[in-house]
């Protein structure tokens, strides 16, 4: 066990309910309530983590506002974090007490067709993000409860706005003990999302020109990924001009604030060129045929 791991956790809590502080969301858009909650021990194939750092991603904000995810309250939000394994449940063989870890909301069971595939996707059958999921996969129950014993729901396979959380071991990644725990939180979502988009999904080639819409943490991670891959031009677009400075520090070569342009889109973009055919609605099958044969860009149907 590394020095950080051994200083932060104690073997006395293993197998017991832990009482700790958490920020609980009781209703959409209402301030989080920082209060004492109870955290159950991990069950089969689960681990309990002492969270050391957590940061806030826009996805947490969206869930808090009630724009995404199931409306399950009370709930513990948060998914970007780093911490130390406090205890492990039955059957967990790849993680030990004291391991430094980050939670991963897109977990990997390592057994399903998606996890095994190198080509198609890494969206695990069992532990991929499921917006309706708010309990543990094991038994459909919550490992968090209020001091009065009322269940508190989970979020995005993670729930990190708490000093202790319980995760499926498939949603935990062990990291190097020498790595900065502060910086490693960023790898659980924001920075990995941006870098992954450039390096894996787009597989950007050297010399490319890139446009990045939105220069928040995710967008700036795209910029960073593009810079490292040798993009020759990186155009940052954001409605907040303050983002120009940070963008330039990371690697944008140009900045555009769409609000600086007051021309409506139909005067900037040549839309007419895209309408190659027009037909009555009754001819929809002919219109489909045109597209099938590659003869049209867009056939406009009149209803
Ligand atoms: N794995 C994933 O799919 C994943 C991971 C992380 C975040 N997200 C999503 O990515 C988005 C960005 O997350 P973030 O944490 O970087 O957010 P953020 O709030 O840090 O940044 C968003 C940026 O977009 C800018 N913006 C807003 N509207 C714009 C517009 N119309 N045109 C141009 N710029 C605009 C804002 O000014 C801000 O700079 C969120 O929707 C979040 O939910 C997805
Ligand atoms: Zn996120
Ligand atoms: Zn899987």
Image (tube, rainbow, N blue to C red):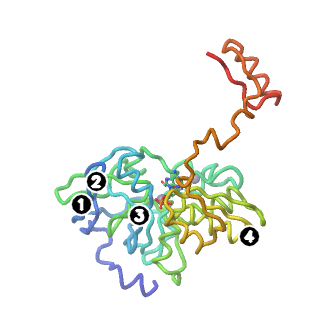
Say above or below: 148 vs 98: above
Residue under label 2, please give it: 152
How far apart marks 1 and 4 lie (CA) works out to 45 Å
Badge 2 density bin: few <14, some 14–19, many ≥20, Cα 10 Å: many
**279 vs 21, nearest the viewer:** 279
Say above or below: 202 vs 87: above
Residue 221 on image: x %, y %? 58, 66
Which residue lies at the image location 58% right of the left edge and 45% below the top edge?
A: 263
Q: Quadrant of the N terminus?
A: bottom left
Q: Which comes sooner in the sequence, label 1 or label 4?
A: 1
Q: Which comes sooner in the sequence, label 4 or label 3?
A: 3
How far apart marks 3 and 1 lie (CA) works out to 16 Å
Q: Which comes sooner in the sequence, label 2 or label 4?
A: 2
Mark 2 falls on what kind of element? strand
Mark 1 falls on what kind of element? strand
Q: Is residue 154 left or right of residue 179?
A: left
Badge 4 density bin: few <14, some 14–19, many ≥20, Cα 10 Å: some
Residue under label 4, please give it: 230
Residue 219 on image: x %, y %? 57, 61
Mark 3 falls on what kind of element? loop
Q: Is residue 295 left or right of residue 261?
A: right
Q: Which comes sooner in the sequence, label 3 or label 2?
A: 3
Which residue lies at the image location 35% right of the left edge and 81% below the top edge?
A: 8
Image marks 2 and 4: residues in contact by CB distance under 8 Å: no
Mark nearer the viewer, 3 or 2 = 3
Which residue lies at the image location 64% right of the left edge and 49% below the top edge?
A: 113
Residue under label 3, please give it: 56
Mark 4 falls on what kind of element? loop
Mark nearer the viewer, 2 or 4 = 4
How far apart marks 1 and 2 lie (CA) works out to 12 Å
- Outermost residue on the top side: it is 282
């Amino acid at each position: 066990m590394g020095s950080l791991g051994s200083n932060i956790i104690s073997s006395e809590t293993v197998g017991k309910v832990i009482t700790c502080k958490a920020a609980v969301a009781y209703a959409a858009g209402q301030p989080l309530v920082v209060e004492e909650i109870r955290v159950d021990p991990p069950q089969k194939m689960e681990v309990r983590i002492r969270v050391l750092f957590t940061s806030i991603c826009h996805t947490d904000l969206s869930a808090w506002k009630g724009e995404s995810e199931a409306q399950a309250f009370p709930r513990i939000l948060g998914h970007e974090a780093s911490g130390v394994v406090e205890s492990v449940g039955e059957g967990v063989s790849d993680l030990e007490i004291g391991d430094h870890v980050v939670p991963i909301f897109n977990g990997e069971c390592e057994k399903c067709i998606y996890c095994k595939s190198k080509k198609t996707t890494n969206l695990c059958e069992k532990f991929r993000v499921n917006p309706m999921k708010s309990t543990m996969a094991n038994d459909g129950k919550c490992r968090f409860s209020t001091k009065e014993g009322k269940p508190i729901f989970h979020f995005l396979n993670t729930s990190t706005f708490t000093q202790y959380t319980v995760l499926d071991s498939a949603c935990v990644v062990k990291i190097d003990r020498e790595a900065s725990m502060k910086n490693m939180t960023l790898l659980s979502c924001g920075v990995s999302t941006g870098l992954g988009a450039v390096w894996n999904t787009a597989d950007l080639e050297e010399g490319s020109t890139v446009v990045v819409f939105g220069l928040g943490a995710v967008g700036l991670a795209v910029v960073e990924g593009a810079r490292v891959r040798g993009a020759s031009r990186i155009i940052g677009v954001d409605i907040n001009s303050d983002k120009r400075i940070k963008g330039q520090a990371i690697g944008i070569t140009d900045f555009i604030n769409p609000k600086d342009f007051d021309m409506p889109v139909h005067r900037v973009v040549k839309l007419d060129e895209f309408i190659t055919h027009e037909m009555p609605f009754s001819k929809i099958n002919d219109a489909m045929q045109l597209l099938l044969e590659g003869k049209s860009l867009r056939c406009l149907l009149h209803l």
